[in-house]
Amino acid sequence: MSKAQNETVTAVKSAGRPKASEVEARTQELIHAAGCLILRHGYTRVSLEAIAREARVAVRTIYVKFGGKAGLLKAVLASRRERLFAGHSMDADTRPLREIVDDFARDFYDMLVEPDAMAMQRVVIAEAGSNPELAEAFYEGGPRLTREMLYRFFSRPDIRSQLRDDVPLDLLPIHLIGCISGDPIGRFLFPDTQPTREETRRELAARLELFYASVLKNR
């Protein structure tokens, strides 16, 4: 085969094989399409066929990449978590404890009150009772990972040494998340009467002071 023929064959093969960046872009488009449809119609009522049609992929692609709808939901939640924790890791952060927790708390609270995040929570609350797959996928794709990250953080020797000896580490993640969350019932029932961003920042700071008072030594 001549050099020209070899070059032609190579070009054809390259043209038929998408680049890694293109594959990643299509995957993100699929995740985005799935998230939008779930928010719009609910988890149970959205079919894989509808998601595939919206994302312009084959249903088989969803099974190959995510194992099905539950795996796709986990990917939607993971994408949101990656945006929250991009650029920093509590496992390796060497700043003072309060700076690390304060930054996490502000970012996590902002994520909780995003319209899309609240809409997703409403979907899960409404459908989890009749759809165990949804409940498990949501927990595995979001809350469990966040709680495990916080547990690892509080278990670090340099961090544990600053905590009261009687503080149960296994309860700390839930305790902190509760202090950050504030009044979720009020947010869900009365979304039009919520405080301003400045007020929510002050209220969050006050709840964090309660958290620190309950867990730190020698304040």
Image (cartoon, grey):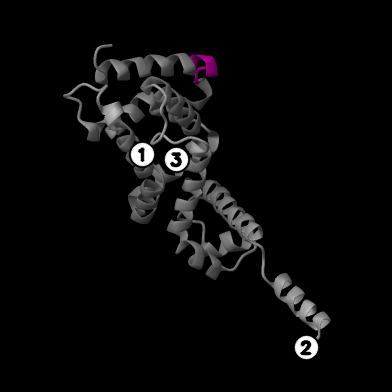
Structural distance between the alpha carbons of marks 2 and 1: 57 Å
Q: Quadrant of the C terminus?
A: top left
Residue 186 shows up from this direction: no
- Per the image, the residue denoted by label 1 is 149
The magenta stretch spans residue 195: yes
User: In the image, what residue type sits under mark 2?
Assistant: Met
The secondary element bearing badge 2 is classed as loop
Q: Which stretch did the figure color magenta?
A: 194-199
Residue furthest left in the image = 166
Task: Count the marks.
Answer: 3
Choose between 41 and 68: the one closer to the eye: 68
Is mark 2 in CB contact (under 8 Å) with mark 1? no
For label 2, the residue is 1
Q: Nearer the viewer, mark 1 or mark 3?
A: 1
Task: Please name the amino acid that badge 1 sits on.
Answer: Met
Question: What SS does tag 1 mark?
Answer: helix
Q: In the rendered image, which quarter is residue 149 located in? A: top left
Report, in whole angstroms, how far the alpha carbon at label 1 lies from the one at label 3: 24 Å
**1 or 3: tag closer to the N-terminus:** 3
x, y percent for residue 128: 36, 48
Q: Residues within 10 Å of mark 1 (few under 14, many from 20)?
A: some
Asked if residue 133 lies left or right of residue 170, the reply is right
**Residue pointed to by mark 3:** 122
Q: Residue at x 81, y 85 (%)?
A: 2
Residue 57's quadrant in the figure? bottom right
